[in-house]
Amino acid sequence: MIEKRQFYINGEWVDPVESRDCAVIDPSTEEACAVISLGGQADADKAVAAAKAAFPAWMATPPAERIALVEKLLEIYKRRAGEMGAAISLEMGAPIDMSNTSQVGAGTWHISNFLRAAKGFEFIRPLGDHAPNDRIVYEPVGVCALITPWNWPMNQVTLKVVAAAIAGCTMVLKPSEESPLDAVLFAEMMDEAGFPKGVFNLVNGDGMGVGSALSGHPDVDMVSFTGSTRAGIAISQNAALTLKRVHLELGGKGANIIFNDADDKAVKRGVLHMMNNTGQSCNAPSRMLVQKDVYDQAVETAAEVASKVTVGPASESGRHIGPVVNEAQWNKIQGLIQKGIDEGARLVAGGLGRPDGLNKGFFVRPTVFADVTNEMTIAREEIFGPVLSIIPFETEEEAIEIANDTVYGLTNYVQTTDGGKANRVALQLRSGMVEMNGQSRGAGAPFGGMKQSGNGREGGVWGIEDFLEVKSVAGWAAE
């Protein structure tokens, strides 16, 4: 059993001021794999005070020096990648091979892209030729509370911590209590890289405790949160009392529009994308919209592909999917599968219960529903599990209408070999991101959504800018 009880505050590993023990459950076995301490208000206060004290000096540190420390962090992160992969796999159930590649690799990718963006970023720049004595100054927001989820832990930790550090902010990280081991390991890396005391602080806790203490803290200038829309609303309400900046990356219910001229791998690609990470991704293509003249074949293909997706323990090597994160998630998913059946959707793959041969662990059968309407619960709610809904449509206009008929607006997908149609549809989809024909977003592209999927953008230049204030200075003296 791993015991990670200490917090990282002001450059030291310290015992919590007030805490209670919390078991971290291995979702493949349903057994405790670690014990951590959850902090409280006093621990949050201590960490914020350290970040506040460190801010003036860190803000004044030349960007080149901040960048050099991030470069050192990247070296350490790469060297300790095996430890990170093992921690993520154990605590949240990502299969070990996927954890070592995609989960850990997300952190490497974002740190590298931030470094590229930072080296070309002008923190002080002219307003324009029309105003030669005006300057636009980008300066750090201040003390930032960073609250991260369990589903892609290093993806979100690096998107927040590294951007904030490059911008010149100091920070307190509160990772999910479901996946705290990777964050403790990351704090060790930040310490080894030599970031000054108080720049980075780590306090474990739950949302009601440390999360609320940070989001409402008068000395926190910004909250950057990734998680559920419900929690994002609560954080926004709490933060409003101090008028701090709030950056939210929330849920999604992505539409994957498959036109009748889509390439022959589009359906298979969409199903496998949906099942990746056991469906626990906010940008998952969970609604597959299929044009009617290719609908029957698409349903048949989707059912066949899903039936071949294997499920197994996270500790085993292979291309299978693992469990969902905990019992509460498992129960929620089972309830939504039952809701789909009750509301008249046609179950063509998977269904209720655990996969054959697995009587322990939070495993879900890869599930596909056909003949779904966009009014059904499974088409409205974010399931956050390996459950795909297939919805028929007739015209381009109808597809756009269905895709946009959701409170969410994170990522939508378009599959067509007609380039003009692809571009036309992309411009009408109300989402922060659109990916077409299997093409992933490029290095440094911004991640973020519209509507109840949140605000702000993470990654690359946009991610750095989210942690910066814009100051207008007139009468800048010639040097």
Image (cartoon, helix red, strand yellow):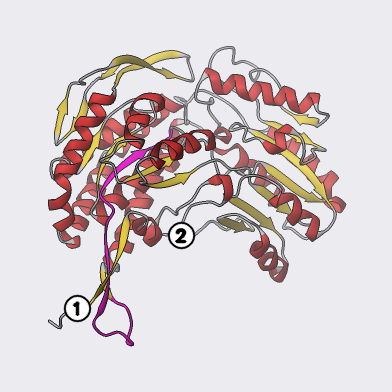
Reading the chain from its start, which is encountered first: label 1 or label 2? 2
Label 2 Cα neighbours within 10 Å, binned few <14 / some 14-19 / many ≥20: some
Q: Is residue 166 left or right of residue 262?
A: left
Q: Residue furthest front?
A: 241
In this view, 120 is above or below 198: below
Q: Position of residue 417 (x, y in %)?
A: 72, 64
Q: Is residue 276 left or right of residue 180?
A: right
| Badge nearest the viewer, 1 or 2 | 1
Amino acid type, residue under disc 2 in the picture: Ala
- Which stretch did the figure color magenta? 126-149
In this view, 109 is above or below 274: below
Q: Secondary structure at mark 1?
A: loop
In this orientation, which residue lies closer to the viewer: 233 or 62? Answer: 233
Q: Quadrant of residue 180?
A: top left
Dot 1 corresponds to which residue?
476
Queried whether the magenta region covers residue 127, the answer comes back as yes
Q: Secondary structure at mark 2?
A: loop
From the image, which quarter does the C terminus lie in? Answer: bottom left
Queried whether the magenta region covers residue 100, the answer comes back as no
Q: Position of residue 367 (x, y in %)?
A: 69, 30
Amino acid type, residue under disc 1 in the picture: Trp
Can residue 9 be seen at all in this image of the molecule?
yes
Label 1 Cα neighbours within 10 Å, binned few <14 / some 14-19 / many ≥20: few
Residue 445: assigned label: 2
Q: Quadrant of residue 102?
A: top left
